[in-house]
Amino acid sequence: MDPKSRTPSQLSATQLQAPLARLLRPLVRLCIRSGMTFPALAQLLRELFVNVAEHDFALDDKPQTDSRVSLLTGIHRKEVARLRGAGAPVNVVPATLSRTSAIIAHWLAAPEFTDAKGDPRPLPRTADDGAPSFEALVGAITKDVRPRAVLDEWLDRQLVTIDADDNIVLADTGFVPRGDDDRKWYYLGRNLHDHIAAAADNVSEATPRFMERAVHYDGLSPKLARRLEARSRELAMEALKTANREANRALAKDKGGDARWNFGVYIYLEEPKDAREEGGDS
C-alpha cells in the first residue's frame, strides 16, 4: 500500500512511541557525542517532516497544499510555507566513494583477483600479458582515474598496504571505514536508512515484504557473548562475500536501470559496564 494513502487508524502513533524511543536512543547518544544539540536536531526533523509530507504523501493528480502538509505534520502553515520547496533529500553517492566501493567489490568477487578460498589476492602494481594486477583491477572499473592516483589515495587512507614482495594487499579497513574516513558517515546514513525502511514497510503491510530477522539471546555470560560475536562475524563475512560474488557476476550481464539493492548484516553485543572496562573473560 502506498504510504500517502494510509489513514491514522491504520498506523497507531501510540504503538509507535515505545519502539521509536528505543530506536532513537543510540542516535541521540551519537548526537550528543558529536555535538549536535536538541534545537539543531529539532530543526532538522521539522524540515524532514515537511519534506516527506510534501513529496511522499501527495495525492494523485492534486497539488500538495500548505494546509495539507500542515495537517499531516502538525507544523504551523506559515512554517510549512517557509520550509517547502527545498526538494527531496539528496541521495547521490559521492563519486570517490562510489569508485572505491566498486573497485573493492570487484577485487573481492572476480575470480582472477581472488584466491582458491575466495579471498582477495595480493596484486602486483602492473603485469604483462593481461595477468591480474592492481592496474588491471582499477582499469576494469574506471578509465577516468590513473591506477597510481587510486593507489596513492588508498595508501593514505590505509585501505591497502604494500607487502615484502611489493604486492598491494587489501587491508581490513577496506571493509570497515575508520578514523576520519568520510565513508563511515555515508554508510551510517545509507545502511540505517535501508534497515529502518525495510522494518517500517514490514510493520506497515499485512504481509512483510522484506527479510528482516535476527538471532538473539539474553542472559549470557560476557565470555559466551564475545565468542558468539566472533563466530557471527565469520558467518556474516562469508554471506557478504558470497552475495557480492553473485551480484558481481550478474552485473556483467545486466542492462542497467534505476533499481537499487542492499544486502546488509549487523551484529550487536551488549556487555555489563564492568566487563567492558576489564576487557577480559568473566
Image (cartoon, grey):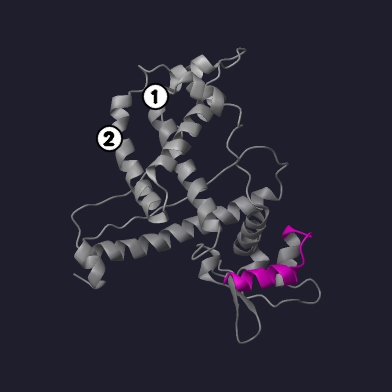
Using the image, tell me which numbered label, if any, was put on residue 193: none
Q: Can you tell which quarter of the image residue 259 is in? A: top right
Q: Can you tell which quarter of the image residue 231 is in? A: bottom left
Q: Which residues are magenta?
A: 141-158
Query: Is 246 on the left-hand or right-hand side of 200?
Result: right
Expressed as whole percent of the image width and height from the top left, the position of residue 135 reads 74, 70
Q: Nearer the viewer, mark 1 or mark 2?
A: 2
Nearest the camera: 114 or 85? 85
Q: Residues within 10 Å of mark 2 (few under 14, many from 20)?
A: few
Q: Amino acid at mark 1?
A: Ala
Expressed as whole percent of the image width and height from the top left, the position of residue 108 reads 59, 63
**To which residue does mark 2 refer?**
18
Q: Residue drawn at (55%, 19%), measured in percent from left and top?
A: 58
Q: Earlier in the sequence, mark 1 or mark 2?
A: 2
Expressed as whole percent of the image width and height from the top left, the position of residue 30 reads 39, 52
**To which residue does mark 1 refer?**
206
Q: Amino acid at mark 2?
A: Ala
Kindly tell me whether residue 2 is visible in this rendering: no
Q: Residue drawn at (60%, 83%), measured in percent from left and top?
A: 163
Above or below: residue 116 compared with residue 216: below
Secondary structure beneath dot 1 equals: loop
Q: Are marks 1 and 2 in contact (CB under 8 Å)?
A: no
